[in-house]
């Protein structure tokens, strides 16, 4: 048998596994999304306001940049293992580890998004009598929206794609099947891997579309985001979170 | 297929050698264990980790650089290449390793293919952006001096793009160090492996988790600092990193 035939055979078995175990896989996928959602929610509740306020004050850029570097340098396996020694096996340690992972892009982008609003726009808002809070709500946040949304999207995709690793510390999800060949066999491991891949890619495409939809089309042409001040895709810094 | 088997086939690394009171009672950190197992556990893992990362970033850079040179001449290509690499990056590493196994087996190749795929999203856009940001005046001067296209590339465009290229490399190296810890789910290699073993203990062995984790973070930060130093030497005019 040629190796190509072996490959095809293996993948056919994997698809057969998916076909006959779809309710188990759906269950595990839901578990994974639940964990990812909780982590993302936790990160957003804590970190988003900090980033926005720091950006508004235009202070603490070191913290915002440091967060993205730290987020990148901390391997998720290390985070999960370290939090496990503190919180024990289960949902909480994984949620916190993934929330730390999500905080990097959210903090960096919420800070950058608000702080990069052009000075002339801020001056104009002040000249028209706006105070801090009003300016933040009516000028800075709308202009920061594309970058903010990009940060949340990157964090969400990262967390969903990383969540399978949580299986090693009782986090459940599709990773449960991927790391347990003894129970599910090669076809199960491969089938669950294909599902995890599909889930992440689906989340990426969906969030990217959503992001485009909530960004007012006029915003892209605004002077605030021109030359050197563009809402760059956060490719270099925050996207590269470990999994 | 996964680490259970890999562990059985690989060298058996004793976790509890010595059995000092600190280790048996699993205290927060046992320096004695680190001293005793630096040579047989931590140092080999660190060396393997450097290898995994170095090979991945090296090959990834070669691919991204060639692709960027092509995309620099044919601009319409850069969008699709960037989109494709972003899509690759969304695939969970744990899943990608397993999906590659039918093709390349439980080998270092499998791990490297996945790690290389992940570096592209950080390297390619930065190299392209660096090349595209070369000022038109500089190109005009090169032309006026009679430089050929090749000379312009080597003496004008690449040196000016260097800071952006290094910025991409920094992100790629740091995240590859992070991602390489996940290789332990497939192979008994890298700094993830001691952590993986420590998690398999009835009560996760803290010293091993913390020491291997700290080494991974230290490795990432050291590599980052080295790249910053390299940029300072090669491009002293670029005081601030563009990304």
Image: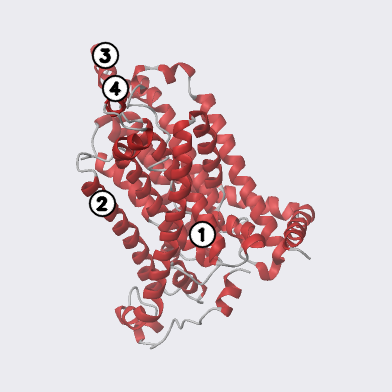
Residue with the mark numbered 4: A118
CA separation in Å, label 3 and label 2: 43 Å
Circles 4 and 1 in contact, beta carbons < 8 Å? no
Instruction: Place residue B22 in its image quadrant.
Output: bottom left
Callout 3: chain: A
Residue B198: % across, % down: 46, 73
Q: Mark 2 and mark 1 in contact? Answer it, CB < 8 Å.
A: no
In the image, taking residue B41 as reference, residue A184 lies left or right, namely right
Identify the image quadrant of residue A204.
Answer: top right
Q: Which residue is mark 3?
A: A124
In the visual, does A135 lie left or right of B73? left
Secondary structure, mark 4, is: loop
* Residue B112 numbered tag: 1
Between the residue at mark 2 and the residue at mark 4, the CA separation in whole angstroms equals: 33 Å
The residue located at (38%, 54%) in the rendering is B173
The location of residue B94, given as percent across then percent down, is 56, 58
Q: Chain of mark 2?
A: B
Tell me: A209 left or right of B68.
right
Query: Which secondary structure, mark 2?
Result: helix
The numbered mark, 2 or 1, whose residue comes first in the sequence reads 1
Give the crowd class for mark 3: few <14, some 14-19, many >=20 residues within 10 Å. few
| Residue B153 x, y percent position in the rendering | 35, 37
> What chain does mark 1 sit on?
B
């Amino acid at each position: 048998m040629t190796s190509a035939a072996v490959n095809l055979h293996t993948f056919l078995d994997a698809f057969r596994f998916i076909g006959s175990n779809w309710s188990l896989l759906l269950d595990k996928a839901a578990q994974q999304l639940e964990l990812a959602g909780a982590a993302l929610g936790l990160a957003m509740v804590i970190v988003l306001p900090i980033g926005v306020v720091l950006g508004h004050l235009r202070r603490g850029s070191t913290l915002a940049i440091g967060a993205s570097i730290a987020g990148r340098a901390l391997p998720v396996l290390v985070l999960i293992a370290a939090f496990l020694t503190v919180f024990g096996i289960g949902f909480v340690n994984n949620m916190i580890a993934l929330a730390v992972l999500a905080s990097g892009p959210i903090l960096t982008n919420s800070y950058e998004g608000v702080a990069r609003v052009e000075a002339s726009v801020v001056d104009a808002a002040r000249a028209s009598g706006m105070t801090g809070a009003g300016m933040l709500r009516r000028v800075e946040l709308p202009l920061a929206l594309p970058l903010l949304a990009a940060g949340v999207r990157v964090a969400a995709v990262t967390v969903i794609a990383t969540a399978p690793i949580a299986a090693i510390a009782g986090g459940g999800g599709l990773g449960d099947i991927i790391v347990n060949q003894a129970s599910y066999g090669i076809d199960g491991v491969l089938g669950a891997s294909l599902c995890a891949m599909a889930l992440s890619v689906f989340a990426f495409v969906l969030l990217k579309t959503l992001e485009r939809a909530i960004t007012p089309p006029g915003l892209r042409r605004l002077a605030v985001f021109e030359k050197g001040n563009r809402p760059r895709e956060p490719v270099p810094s925050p996207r590269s979170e470990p999994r | 297929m996964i680490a259970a088997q890999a562990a059985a086939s690989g060298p058996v690394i004793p976790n509890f050698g010595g059995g000092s009171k600190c280790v048996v009672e699993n205290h927060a950190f046992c320096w004695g264990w680190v001293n005793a197992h630096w040579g047989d556990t931590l140092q080999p893992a660190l060396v393997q980790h450097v290898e995994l990362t170095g090979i991945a970033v090296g090959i990834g850079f070669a691919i991204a650089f060639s692709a960027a040179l092509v995309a620099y001449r044919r601009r319409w290509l850069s969008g699709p290449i960037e989109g494709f690499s972003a899509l690759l990056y969304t695939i969970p590493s744990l899943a990608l390793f397993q999906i590659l196994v039918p093709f390349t087996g439980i080998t270092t190749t499998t791990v490297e293919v996945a790690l290389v795929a992940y570096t592209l999203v950080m390297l390619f856009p930065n190299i392209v952006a660096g090349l595209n940001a070369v000022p038109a005046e500089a190109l005009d001067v090169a032309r006026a001096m009679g430089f050929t296209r090749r000379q312009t590339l080597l003496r004008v465009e690449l040196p000016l793009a260097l800071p952006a290229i290094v910025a991409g490399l920094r992100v790629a190296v740091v995240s590859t160090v992070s991602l390489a810890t996940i290789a332990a789910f497939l192979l008994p290699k890298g700094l993830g492996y001691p952590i993986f073993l420590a998690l398999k203990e009835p009560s996760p062995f803290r010293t091993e988790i913390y020491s291997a984790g700290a080494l991974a973070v230290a490795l990432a930060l050291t590599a980052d600092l080295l790249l910053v130093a390299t940029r300072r030497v090669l491009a002293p005019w670029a005081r601030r990193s563009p990304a």
